[in-house]
């Protein structure tokens, strides 16, 4: 029974890493992203291959030049091997306001994160991530944020410390 409880805790810690990565990217929180990886961790994204810390710099520049992102992990399969683990997580990611020859587009991609994790001193972190692209869809920008209905959407998600998560959630605690 103890091994089963420890395995469940390890799986939840790994799942939290995968979810926290999505928050880090969507909120452009590079300090959070760097806290999720071991110093020698590597990320392979097709458009980027190198250290996870260098990826944080790359992602920060990419996000500054584009609009909102929204990453949705749909399911993860986690294999535990002692102090190491592998996971395959499916993700649908939205990237808004991407500049193209046709003007601004919204990009939706279905990817799989193939991750390796290591547990050191009782803490799990990313050791390696490879992104496999399964499909994508490019759409003309059609978002409406003005007018009698759409102008009332508030609060709107934001990057950084101005997002409602940082200003409202847990503010009284």
Image (cartoon, rainbow, N blue to C red):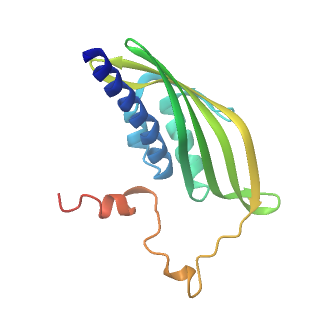
Indicate the quadrant where residue 139 lies. Answer: bottom right
Indicate the quadrant containing the C terminus: top left, top right, bottom left or bottom right: bottom left
- Say whether residue 150 is left or right of residue 136: left
Farthest residue, direction right: 102
Count of numbered tags: 0
Question: Residue at image x 40%, y 61%?
Answer: 163
Horizontal and vertical percent position of residue 33: 43, 38
Decide: is 157 above or below 148. above
- Say whether residue 34 is left or right of residue 109: left
Horizontal and vertical percent position of residue 20: 42, 41
Decide: is 60 above or below 117. below
Horizontal and vertical percent position of residue 149: 56, 83
Q: Nearer the viewer, residue 97 or 88?
A: 88
Indicate the quadrant containing the N terminus: top left, top right, bottom left or bottom right: top left
Decide: is 74 above or below 95. above
Decide: is 107 above or below 57. below
Question: Residue at image x 72%, y 36%?
Answer: 134
Question: Residue at image x 50%, y 46%?
Answer: 25
Indicate the quadrant where residue 143 lies. Answer: bottom right
Question: Residue at image x 46%, y 62%?
Answer: 158
Farthest residue, direction front: 1
- Say whether residue 45 is left or right of residue 70: right
Farthest residue, direction left: 173
Farthest residue, direction top: 82
Horizontal and vertical percent position of residue 119: 35, 19
């Amino acid at each position: 029974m103890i091994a089963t409880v420890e395995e469940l805790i390890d799986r939840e810690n790994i799942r939290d890493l995968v979810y926290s990565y999505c928050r880090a990217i969507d909120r452009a929180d590079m300090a959070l992203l760097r806290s999720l990886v071991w110093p020698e961790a590597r990320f392979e994204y097709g458009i980027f291959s190198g250290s996870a810390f260098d990826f944080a710099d790359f992602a920060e520049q990419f996000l500054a030049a584009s609009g909102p992102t929204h990453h949705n992990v749909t399911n993860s399969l986690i294999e535990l091997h002692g102090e190491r683990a592998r996971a395959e997580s499916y993700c649908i990611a939205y990237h808004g306001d991407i500049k193209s020859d046709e003007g601004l587009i919204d990009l939706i991609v279905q990817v799989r994160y193939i991750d390796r994790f290591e547990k050191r001193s009782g803490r799990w972190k990313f050791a390696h991530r490879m992104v496999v692209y399964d499909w994508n869809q490019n759409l003309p920008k059609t978002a409406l944020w003005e007018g009698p209905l759409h102008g009332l959407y508030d609060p709107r998600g934001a990057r950084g410390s101005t997002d409602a998560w940082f200003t409202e959630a847990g503010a009284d605690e």
